[in-house]
Image (cartoon, helix red, strand yellow):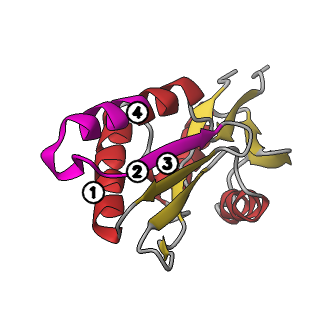
Amino acid sequence: MASEHSYDVVCKLDKQEVTNAVQQTLQETGQRYDFKNAKYEIKFDQTAMTLNLSADSDFRLKGLSDILDTRMAKRNIPLTAITREPIETTSGGNARQVYKLQTGIPSDKAKEIVKLVKDMKLKVQAAIQSDQVRISGKDLDELQAAQKAILKADLKIFVQFVNYR
């Protein structure tokens, strides 16, 4: 008798790695000539999973954003897991931007994953469990086929596969 196998489709970002990327960014900007005597900051809200970037000009904010993106990529934080809000410019010429970090699979995307798997007509089940999707079935090849299809699908979100059983 074949046993049931499963895995979870999730999105979990390492908060410590995000913190490290922010610290490295601030350290690098502190040494750069184009940021000399400039006002800028990055605030990481760990409960809301947002980064608030602000600088004294649009140009500096874009530079800060570029450095942060590079540091995050080097720390294996997928840039596809970040939604960047539009840059806001205040009357004083200051600029700010919010980065929203994806945590979990949004419900509309979870439904999309379930539909994608069901439309493949494989002998696997897909079930939404809060902010993740569990894929289960008896045939490992079919589970792998579902995984490949999820990766190929243009979901515009970051996904990971964990808890293989």
Q: Quadrant of residue 131?
A: top right
Queried whether the magenta region covers residue 31, the answer comes back as: yes
Q: Is residue 5 above or below residue 25?
A: above
**Which residue has dot 2 on it?**
40
Task: Give how far across and how far down residue 23 sits, in percent.
Answer: 41, 30
Label 4 and label 3: CA atoms lie apart by: 30 Å
Report the magenta residues as a range.
23-45
| Cβ atoms under marks 4 and 3 closer than 8 Å | no
**From where the camera sits, is residue 159 visible?**
yes
Label 2 and label 4: CA atoms lie apart by: 16 Å
Q: Secondary structure at mark 2?
A: strand
Q: Which mark is residue 63?
A: 1
**Which residue has dot 4 on it?**
21
State which mark lies toward you, 4 or 3.
4
State which mark lies toward you, 2 or 1.
2
**How crowded is the residue under tag 3: few (<14 C-alpha within 10 Å), some, or many (20+)?**
few
Of residues 101 and 53, the one drawn nearer to the viewer in this rendering: 53
Query: At label 4, which amino acid type do we have?
Result: Ala
Q: Is residue 33 above or below residue 111?
A: above
| Cβ atoms under marks 2 and 1 closer than 8 Å | no
**Which residue has dot 3 on it?**
148
Q: Secondary structure at mark 1?
A: helix
